Amino acid sequence: MKTNYKRLLLPFLLLVICTLSSCIGLSMDIQMNRNGSGRLTLEYRLSRMLENIGKLDGNESMPSIPVGRADFERTTERIEGLKIVSFSSRNESKDTVYKAVLDFDNEKALLEFLDPAKTRASFTKNGQGGSLNITIIDTIPVYDPDMLELISILSHEYDFTISLSSPSNSTLTILDSKGNTLSKVPSAKVVSLGKKVSFTIGIMDLLNLKDGLGLIFNW
């Protein structure tokens, strides 16, 4: 049965759909400085079943996910102004948890990491601050019901979180795929104003969003 999938910003989330036999949770924190530099911290957990699929070397037909420091080093070598600060991993009962910390010199380096295709993330300078616009989901899915049920069973403990902090108060605006502002998203936890703003939603709830999802961070 042919299945069309939502287009997702990051390959981490894409793997949730494409593998269908494993789970992943992702936390992404962006710390912005006034001059456009900053730090990006990624922490993601993979079901042990996913690890062999996730190697960048080999399994070329499967989506790739970085599971080692060398994977991130290849990325930082490609992007000027981006460097890896640290990388670590730890084993838990059913998952392996990876954490990578990256420093970026400017907004361009951050955007190139978040969106290599340059179609779903943009930055606008605004006085002493700025605006980061990220499209998380931009199309409506058609799922095989059996696959959807399997994802629901496997992903119920996994979340997607994205946050941004800056020297001044920030705001977070939530949009649908048409650019309409959403006052709320079912099941999402949102901090929309403060030195640190954030959006958290369960992986299954994210995949169930019918109208897409975009986030605008202003600071």
Image (cartoon, helix red, strand yellow):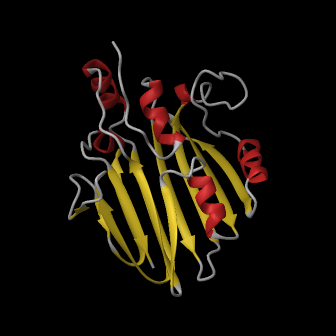
The image quadrant where one finds the N terminus is: top left
Q: x%, y% of residue 138?
A: 37, 45
Q: Residue drawn at (31%, 62%), measured in percent from left and top?
A: 174
- The quarter holding residue 103 reads bottom right
The answer to which of 99 and 8 lies nearer the viewer is 8
Residue at x-position 54% and y-position 66%: 30
Q: List x then y, in percent, for residue 84.
A: 73, 58
Q: Name which residue lies at 60% across and 37% down.
A: 65
Horizontally, residue 185 falls left or right of residue 13, namely left
Which quarter of the image is occupied by the C terminus? Answer: bottom left
Residue farthest top in this picture: 1
Q: Quadrant of residue 80?
A: bottom right
**Which is more toward the observer, 99 or 58?**
58
Residue 9 drawn at (x, y percent) = 47, 47
Count up the numbered dots: 0
Q: Residue at x 50, y 62 (%)?
A: 122
Q: Is residue 131 above or below residue 110?
A: below
